Amino acid sequence: MSCMEVFRSIPVTLLLALAAFAQEGTPAPTTLIIGGDVTTPLTLKVEDLAKMPRQTIVLQEADGSKTEYEGVPLVEILKRAGAPVGKSLRGNALASYVVAKAHDGYQVVYSLAELDPELTEGRFIVADKRDGKALFGYQGPFRIVAGSDKAAARSVRMLDEIDFVRLKK
């Protein structure tokens, strides 16, 4: 068997896991920090998320299979940190956004309005389970799942920090 044949026989998920480990070399933190311009900064663990309201989002993978993610609506976490959501999301608050930061340096920006189900159809959760099991290795322990997106580019795996930014005060 040639080297190329050996390489092709390695499952893609294993290659991704090895690449994530090689890139950082350290495991993702077991806490999720919510900070920025919030009134109540939070440091959450998996146990904390387990006590909050839960939702599931089912995503169709590229191969046609379906994966079920379970977690807490992102807007619920932001509300607990003191971000203006729901009826408070008006006027200057609409010029606010959230930066989700992954352990490997990946970052995604969401407008606060798109995260609030009172304003849009967007579905965003901070998942801690995939198909009923805890997120593994390069997936977790936390992941933002952007359930209303057509592609998974804004679903942030190895999530370790969420910063709220208010442009107008």
Image (spheres, grey):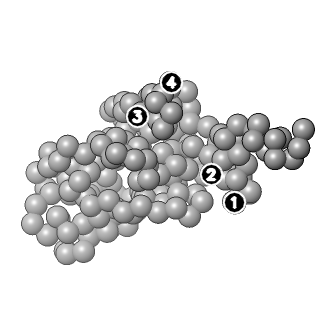
Question: How far apart are the two marked residues, 4 and 2, measured between alpha carbons?
Answer: 20 Å
The answer to whether marks 1 and 2 mark residues whose Cβ atoms lie closer than 8 Å is: yes
Instruction: Say which quadrant the C terminus sits in.
Output: bottom left
Please, what is the three-letter code of the amino acid marked with disc 2?
Ala
Question: How far apart are the two marked residues, 3 and 2, measured between alpha carbons?
Answer: 23 Å
Question: How far apart are the two marked residues, 3 and 4, measured between alpha carbons?
Answer: 14 Å
Q: Give coordinates of residue 41: x percent, y percent.
A: 39, 59
The residue identified by callout 1 is 24
In the image, taking residue 96 as reference, residue 160 lies left or right, namely right
Q: Secondary structure at mark 2?
A: loop
Q: Nearer the viewer, mark 1 or mark 2?
A: 1
The residue identified by callout 4 is 132
Question: How far apart are the two marked residues, 4 and 1, measured between alpha carbons?
Answer: 27 Å
For residue 28, the mark is: 2
Q: Secondary structure at mark 4?
A: loop
Please, what is the three-letter code of the amino acid marked with disc 4?
Gly
Is 53 or 130 nearer to us in this picture?
A: 130
Q: Farthest residue toward the top?
A: 132
The residue identified by callout 3 is 59
In the image, taking residue 136 as reference, residue 62 lies left or right, namely left
Q: Residue at x 52, y 49 (%)?
A: 157
For residue 50, the mark is: none
Q: Nearer the viewer, mark 3 or mark 2?
A: 3
Q: Residue at x 20, y 53 (%)?
A: 85
Q: Earlier in the sequence, mark 3 or mark 2?
A: 2
Q: Farthest residue toward the right?
A: 1
Q: Nearer the viewer, mark 1 or mark 3?
A: 3
Q: Secondary structure at mark 1?
A: helix
Is 44 or 111 nearer to us in this picture?
A: 111
